[in-house]
Image (tube, grey):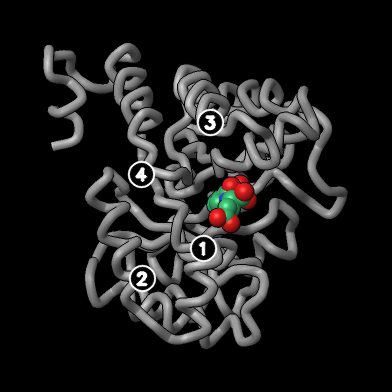
Amino acid sequence: MYAIGERINGMFKAVAAAIQEKNPEPIQELAKTQLAAGAQALDVNVGPATADPLAAMGWLVKAIREVTDAPLAIDTTKPEVMRRGLEMAGPGSIINSSKGQQDQLDIFIPMAVEHQASLIALTIDENGIPRDANGRGEIALRVVAAAMEKGLSPDRVMIDAVILPVNVTQPTPGHVLETIRNVKLLSDPPPKTVLGLSNVSQGTTQRAIINRTYLVMCLAAGLDAAILDVTESEMMDAMIAAEVLLNHAVYCDDFLKAYRS
Ligand code: THG
């Protein structure tokens, strides 16, 4: 599984403070810790409260680039902030994210092609988040068709079926699992699938066990990537065990250690 570290997000107080004070050290620490814990890419989100998101994104990416060349998932809804992040991060980045409606795809698909980036597309359109897996699949199909038309290979598209807190909407985890299975049939090569895993447990009292269990269920359904807290080592152990059981990683007696190295 492709692990994208979630912690460089202005939703966390320490990150918001570092952005505010222009103090790169906490950000660079988070970059290094997440990569050491198994992240293959880092999500970068300035958070909801930043006064100047354009400047903040530029500053964040520059601070991260001083310590790593790892791919960055530029997490913003604003096209101008996205462009700044991609320019500062360089090729091989991830656009996080476009909605599945035409006006957004018309902006973000060409941006992915221009910046040699992958594209995360949410199964959300002008009507909001679909009620079930069929609605999510219809949006995913439109995304894949638009990508192919504009010269972005479907395997550089990551469909995000939008997981919501289980205490708010209990049928959604099941709809998302069904969507993960279905989008693999949309094209050849198929698009990848991704989730912001921690959403599923937001506001619940048992976050770790919900995250860990749902991650394993998603992997069994074919999930390719997740934005998650890679520093939760029990969750990462469960992820690795699932990868072995799905025959995505080779079994040996020391498989946890072997996977991590
Ligand atoms: N899909 C895509 N991108 C995403 C999301 C998604 N990016 C943002 C988010 N969702 C994924 N990242 C997080 C990061 C943190 C949390 C949830 C998702 C989280 N934070 C604590 C909380 O809200 O309780 C904050 C705790 C604190 O303030 O210290 O759970 O779905 N493509």
Q: Which of marks 4 and 1 is in front?
A: 4
Q: Regarding mark 4 in the picture, which secondary structure is present there? A: loop
User: Badge 2 is on which residue?
Assistant: 26
- Please report the residue visible at 52 percent of the width from the left and 87 percent of the height from the top: 55
User: Badge 1 is on which residue?
Assistant: 9
Q: Is residue 196 left or right of residue 59?
A: right
Amino acid of disc 3: Asn
- Residue 203 position within the rendered picture, expressed as x and y whole percent measured from the top left: 70, 40
Q: Is residue 168 left or right of residue 99?
A: right
- Residue 213 position within the rendered picture, expressed as x and y whole percent measured from the top left: 51, 21
Of labels 4 and 1, earlier in sequence is 1
- Residue situated in front as seen by the camera: 153 or 128: 128
User: Badge 3 is on which residue?
Assistant: 211
User: Badge 4 is on which residue?
Assistant: 231
- Residue situated in front as seen by the camera: 18 or 117: 18
- Residue 76 position within the rendered picture, expressed as x and y whole percent measured from the top left: 59, 67
Per the model, the C-alpha gap separating discs 3 and 4 is 13 Å
Ligand 1 within 8 A of label 1's CB?
Answer: yes
Amino acid of disc 4: Thr
